[in-house]
Image: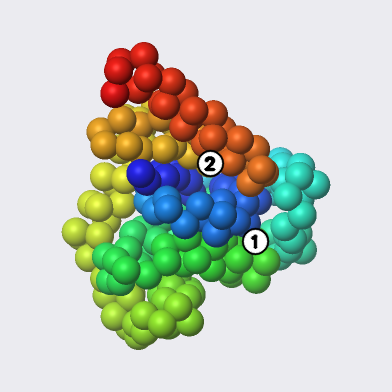
Amino acid sequence: MELVLAADPMCSWCYGFGKQMGLLLERRPDLSLKIILGGLRAGATDVLDDAGKQFRLHHWGKVEEASGVPFNREGLLARKGFVYDTEPVCRAVVTARILRPDADLLSVFRAFQHAFYVDALDTTDGAVLAETGSRALTELGHPVASEEFLAEWNKRSTIEEAATDFATVRAMGVSSFPTLFLKKGETLRKVGAGYAHVDELEKHLAAMAAEQIDKGIEQGE
């Protein structure tokens, strides 16, 4: 069985959910994780104005209250001419997946989140993304030079793979991020949508397992 997470690194609730997702994998080592990038605001061109900043700060407060994760509010407020396009950072996660498929992609995903929400880095900039991704993979024992990361990030095939992720998420019927699924064979079942504590996620998984056992008994398996 496999967990499938539909998420976007520049989605604040996905950021808040990252720690809970990590804890769930620690508790359930029998489950692997596949991350499909959501493209929350992929291709956006509008500049983040003061109203947009205040809107996000409001949501950040809710995420911080629920999850305890830190936010660099001053960093957001100081941004000038920032376009909140999530395609570049989603593509950076895809780049890491292509370059080092055996690496812990959730840790890489969270490194990009930390870069945006805590370090206040411009995660729409290829050079910043390459440096962040290179460092994250290297720290995980999968060294990649930032130049190699940037070259892969710029490839047409990588752009297309990220777009495929976005289309897959839409085809799955995902309407909000994060959304977590459990995949068994060809069957995909929703575990939860939005932020959830690890204990709640475990309860859902246990209930799904019990339901599956009941069905097996009914069918005489």
Amino acid at pointer 1: Tyr
- Residue 203 percent location from the top left of the image: 61, 35
The residue shown at (60%, 56%) is 23
Whole-percent x, y for residue 125 in the image: 46, 67
* Disc sitting over residue 178 in the figure: 2
Relative to 156, residue 166 above or below: above
Q: Image quadrant of residue 90?
A: bottom left
Q: State the quadrant of the C terminus.
A: top left
Q: Residue furthest top?
A: 218
Choose mark 1 or mark 2, whichever is in front. 2
Residue at x 32%, y 63% (from the top left corner): 97
Marker disc for residue 117: 1
Q: Is residue 163 left or right of residue 73?
A: left
> Marks 1 and 2: CB-CB under 8 Å?
no
Looking at the image, residue 163 sits to the left or right of residue 77; the answer is left
Q: Residue at x 54, y 35 (%)?
A: 206
Q: Which SS class for mark 2?
A: loop
Residue type at tag 2: Pro
Categorize mark 1 by other alpha carbons within 10 Å: few (<14), some (14-19), many (20+).
Answer: many
Q: Is residue 221 above or below residue 55?
A: above
